[in-house]
Amino acid sequence: MLPADIEPVIRDPKATPPGHRIDLHHSMCFGCGSEAPVGLRIEVIAGEGLTVTAAMKVEDWMQGGPGVIHGGVLSAAFDEVMGTSPLLLRKPVVTGHLEIDYAKPIPLGSTVHFTGEILGGVRRKVYTRCVAHLGDPANPVAAAHALFIAIDLEKHFSGYRERAVHSQHQNGA
């Protein structure tokens, strides 16, 4: 549920242009990292206004129930897509609350398409929603709403950077 005091937000003029991939924040990220040994490797594409899109192939290792995606994997995908959208405001965020409605099983081997949007904000809070489908937007398989909190990257991650896993390209190995 959106708060009564939610305010419209405006896409930053320096944000990733529509049709382009929003830069990943870390090459070893489970959600978007191109060099993570295991992960979703989701590429989030900037849309018009405050929208984003993404797609994810459902691989065998993502299995939960027999022949279908694990709900936690889908949750991570929603988190990645919606958590990337505030970069259209040029605000790095962390997840404050994520709520998912699962409508239908998603078979292994399918491609899940995501369409997300920023709904508005209140101070440091950014509210988003996202719908997932298997190729027909009129036939959703799941939907999510989330609240993200804008952060100062340096302050938020200070004390953890020395524990970060780095790719071979990042640490020179």
Image (cartoon, helix red, strand yellow):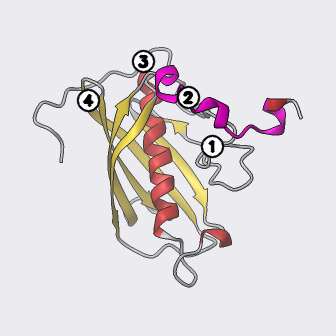
Contact between labelled residues 1 and 4, with CB atoms less than 8 Å apart: no
Name the amino acid, label 4.
Gly
Tell me what residue is drawn at x 56 percent, y 85 percent.
66
Name the amino acid, label 1.
Cys
- Position of residue 60 in the picture relative to residue 150 (left or right): right
The image quadrant that residue 126 belongs to is top left
| Of residues 163 and 77, the one drawn nearer to the viewer in this rendering | 163
The image quadrant that residue 120 belongs to is top left
Say whether disc 3 or disc 4 marks the residue closer to the N-terminus.
3
Mark 4 or 1: in front is 1
CA–CA distance between discs 3 and 2?
30 Å
Say whether disc 1 or disc 2 marks the residue closer to the N-terminus.
1
Farthest residue, direction top: 13
Say whether disc 4 or disc 2 marks the residue closer to the N-terminus.
4
Q: Which mark is residue 121?
A: 4
Say whether disc 3 or disc 2 marks the residue closer to the N-terminus.
3
Contact between labelled residues 2 and 3, with CB atoms less than 8 Å apart: no
CA–CA distance between discs 1 and 3?
24 Å
Bounds of the magenta segment: 153-170
